[in-house]
């Protein structure tokens, strides 16, 4: 197991602190951070990062990731394995720091792994041919992330060879605890509803049709009406989304025109769909440009954009809301 030789160099100037970490003498990585609280440095109050984390990266590369993290107070080190279906497997050593809810890591390709060769057997003109080639070169990677909760990390990554994207990781122990808690709570899942306040009357019918599932303990329904006076709305939305198994989008022209929805709700919903496989179920309430919005029309709508809910009779509207509850119940039982 890779174990970096952490330098004892620690400088403080005013309110700034500089960490210098050396990984086996090959590289020196520096972070300058302002206003790092002493309790974080001294380890009195510290985010626990140590353990096994797994998840995905998206962007220029889409791959599964497994990370083994060791921790020495604010300092992090360990090994990351990335399995890319196109470019193959890569192994990285990393060093980093955690500060409050933030994590910064610098990953360098494992030298022993890069020194290996890749052998592949092919048939050319019905004759076996063995091709041996060195492992593909990988750039250094910088990762910046934050805790969504104790068992979930989300952030961005960027390499020195121009690749970049988003990252999502979950802690295996937290995931196991989560699973046990769900079993104890009859697998209760959160359903996140995104809608325009102009369409709030129709939200009531959706709640009516989901209420029997909520009474059975199968799900919790969340929309912004659950935010209480004095609560920080952004934190409440992030928490609800981190727990959401399904996101329902009540689509209309007002929905697509809402700056709040487009800037604060849709980005994390789409990110969770790409990284975690969260189900996104659009329902077309009113005529709008849904089918011309590439980032939304990639998801199968419950009803055709040519037949929005408001063009239906009262009975047909009830049928579509009932079908939505059936879809959700089926999805939760998968």
Image: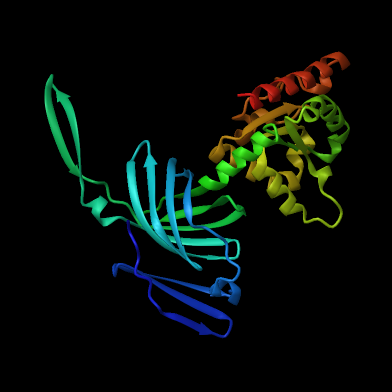
Task: Identify the residue shown where x is 79% and y is 27%.
Answer: 210
Q: Quadrant for residue 1, please give it.
A: bottom left
Q: Nearer the viewer, residue 192 or 201?
A: 192
125 is higher (above) or lower (below) than 158: above
Q: In the rendered image, which quarter contains the C terminus?
A: top right
| Residue 197 placement (x, y as % from top left) | 84, 40
Q: Nearer the viewer, residue 182 or 205?
A: 182
Task: Count up the numbered dots.
Answer: 0
| Residue 178 placement (x, y as % from top left) | 61, 42
Q: Quadrant for residue 219, please give it.
A: top right
Q: Quadrant for residue 2, please give it.
A: bottom left
Task: Identify the residue shown where x is 85% and y is 27%.
Answer: 208
Q: Residue 164 vs residue 289: left or right?
A: left
133 is higher (above) or lower (below) than 312: below
Q: Using the rendered image of the protein, determine whether residue 165 is visible from the camera's viewpoint.
A: yes
Pick out the residue farthest to the bottom.
14
| Residue 114 placement (x, y as % from top left) | 25, 51
Pick out the residue farthest to the left.
127
| Residue 314 placement (x, y as % from top left) | 88, 17
Q: Nearer the viewer, residue 235 or 314?
A: 235
Q: Nearer the viewer, residue 232 or 269?
A: 232
Q: Using the rendered image of the protein, determine whether residue 170 is visible from the camera's viewpoint.
A: no
169 is higher (above) or lower (below) than 297: below
Pick out the residue farthest to the front.
184
Q: Residue 179 vs residue 283: left or right?
A: left
Identify the coloring.
rainbow
């Amino acid at each position: 197991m890779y174990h970096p030789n952490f330098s004892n160099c620690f400088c403080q100037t005013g309110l700034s602190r500089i960490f210098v970490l050396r990984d086996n003498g090959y590289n020196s990585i520096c972070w300058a951070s302002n206003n790092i609280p002493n309790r974080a440095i001294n380890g009195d109050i510290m985010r626990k990062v140590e353990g096994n984390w797994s998840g995905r990266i998206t962007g220029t590369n889409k791959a599964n990731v497994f990370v083994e993290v060791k921790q020495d107070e604010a300092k992090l080190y360990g090994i990351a394995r990335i399995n890319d279906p196109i470019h193959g497997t890569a192994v990285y050593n990393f060093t980093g720091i955690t500060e409050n809810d933030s994590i910064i890591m610098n990953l360098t390709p494992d030298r022993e792994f890069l020194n290996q060769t890749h052998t592949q057997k092919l048939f050319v003109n019905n004759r076996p041919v063995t091709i041996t080639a060195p492992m593909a070169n990988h750039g250094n990677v910088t990762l910046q992330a934050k805790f969504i909760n104790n068992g979930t990390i989300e952030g961005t990554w960027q390499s020195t060879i121009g690749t970049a994207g988003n990252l999502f990781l979950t802690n295996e122990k937290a995931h196991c605890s989560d699973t046990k808690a769900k079993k104890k709570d009859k697998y209760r899942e959160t359903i996140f509803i995104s809608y325009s306040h102009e369409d709030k009357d129709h939200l009531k019918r959706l709640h009516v049709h989901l209420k029997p599932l909520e009474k059975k303990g199968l799900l919790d329904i969340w929309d912004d009406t659950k935010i209480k006076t004095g609560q920080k709305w952004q934190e409440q939305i992030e928490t609800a989304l981190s727990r959401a198994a399904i996101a329902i989008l009540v689509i209309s022209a007002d929905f697509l025109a809402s700056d709040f929805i487009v800037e604060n709700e849709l980005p994390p919903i789409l990110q969770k769909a790409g990284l975690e496989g969260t189900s996104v179920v659009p329902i077309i309430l009113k005529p709008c440009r849904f089918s011309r919005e590439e980032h939304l029309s990639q998801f199968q709508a419950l009803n055709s954009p040519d037949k929005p809910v408001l063009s239906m009779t009262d009975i047909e509207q009830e049928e579509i809301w009932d079908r939505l509850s059936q879809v959700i119940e089926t999805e939760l039982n998968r």
